[in-house]
Image (cartoon, rainbow, N blue to C red):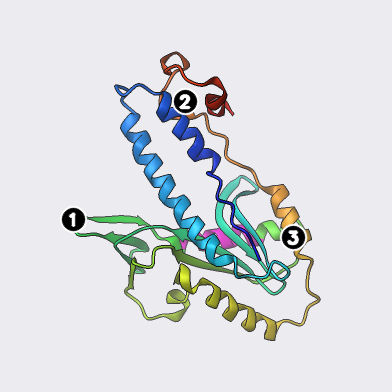
Amino acid sequence: MNKPNTELPLNIRRLEALHRRTPKSHSKRAQMQADLARRYAGFRGEQNVKYHLRRLDNKHYYILHDIRLRYQTMYFQIDTLILSKEFILIAEVKNISGTLFFDTVFNQMIRKTEDKEEGFRSPLAQVQYQQELLYRLFQQNNLPSLPIESLIVISLPSTIIKTDTADKEITSKIVHAEDLIDRIGYLCEQYLQASSKIPPSLKEIGETIKHANIPKQTDILAQYDVTKEALLSGDPVRSVILFL
């Protein structure tokens, strides 16, 4: 069984440290709070997905989280990458409440709540881009040519999912987290029947991808226009994370 890692990601810990050390009068402090709320929401969604993924046998699956890869000059981020001997699955996690409408005409996702409506880039287009670059990256590194699938995983069971199409190629790519394991099981059966190749080494593929991971390096002070001189005094041990 896979055990979830509940430690807060570095980007949240760094932003918390900056928020704690930034004067309340700073013009970007409200933005810091909004960004913290968004990052915490994403973290909770990923933890919920990890909780369900514990049911997978780690003898048959190799799971990587929060991977940033590069193909030539193009970078792409993957929330969760699930490797099996028959296929590879990209899981893009969305922790968004309300009603999500997947508009295939204008290629966008629309979130509706009681008081407003917001538009987002289509996650379906996002995972298609990830699939294409991951396939090329596998070719570049001489890794086994496995089928690459993708899913949009909605972490909140209360989120209502709607779309303007009945096309199963599209609707089958969107699932609630509670249905993720069943969908993985379906893909496993599908590709197990079609597979005639010698199963690849999951550890070899996983270690190659881990080695290719390039965490994003951000100057968090510059991002929020905060100078070192403006920082409030604080515990130097806890605050050193700002400069990692």
Residue 131 inside the magenta-drawn segment: yes
Judge by depth and name the residue closer to the eye, 52 or 165: 52
Which of the 4 image quadrants contains residue 101? bottom left
Which amino acid does the dot numbered 2 rest on? Answer: Leu
Q: Residue at x 50, y 33 (%)?
A: 14
Q: Residue at x 32, y 74 (%)?
A: 164
Which amino acid does the dot numbered 1 rest on? Answer: Asp
Q: Position of residue 175 (x, y in %)?
A: 45, 71
Q: Specify whether 65 is left or right of 195.
A: left
Judge by depth and name the residue closer to the eye, 4 or 81: 4
Q: Specify whether 117 is left or right of 204.
A: left
Return the residue found at the far top.
229
Q: Do the residues labelled 3 and 2 touch (CB within 8 Å)?
A: no
Q: Do the residues labelled 2 and 1 touch (CB within 8 Å)?
A: no
Indicate whether 135 appears above or below 5: below
Indicate whether 24 appears above or below 154: above
Q: Which residue is drawn at 39% across and 23% down?
A: 22
Q: Residue at x 62, y 83 (%)?
A: 190
Marks 3 and 2, the one that precedes in the sequence = 3
Marks 3 and 1, the one that precedes in the sequence = 1
Q: Where is residue 18 in the image (x, y as percent from the top left)?
A: 45, 28
Dot 2 lies on which element? helix
Dot 3 lies on which element? helix
Identify the residue under disc 1: 115
Residue 228 inside the magenta-drawn segment: no
Residue 173 seen from this side: no
Q: Give the range drawn in magenta.
A: 125-135
Dot 1 lies on which element? loop
Marks 2 and 1, the one that precedes in the sequence = 1
Density class for disc 3 (Cα within 10 Å; few <14, some 14-19, many ≥20) is some
Q: Where is residue 72 in the image (x, y as percent from the top left)?
A: 65, 47
Q: Residue 221 carries which label?
A: 2
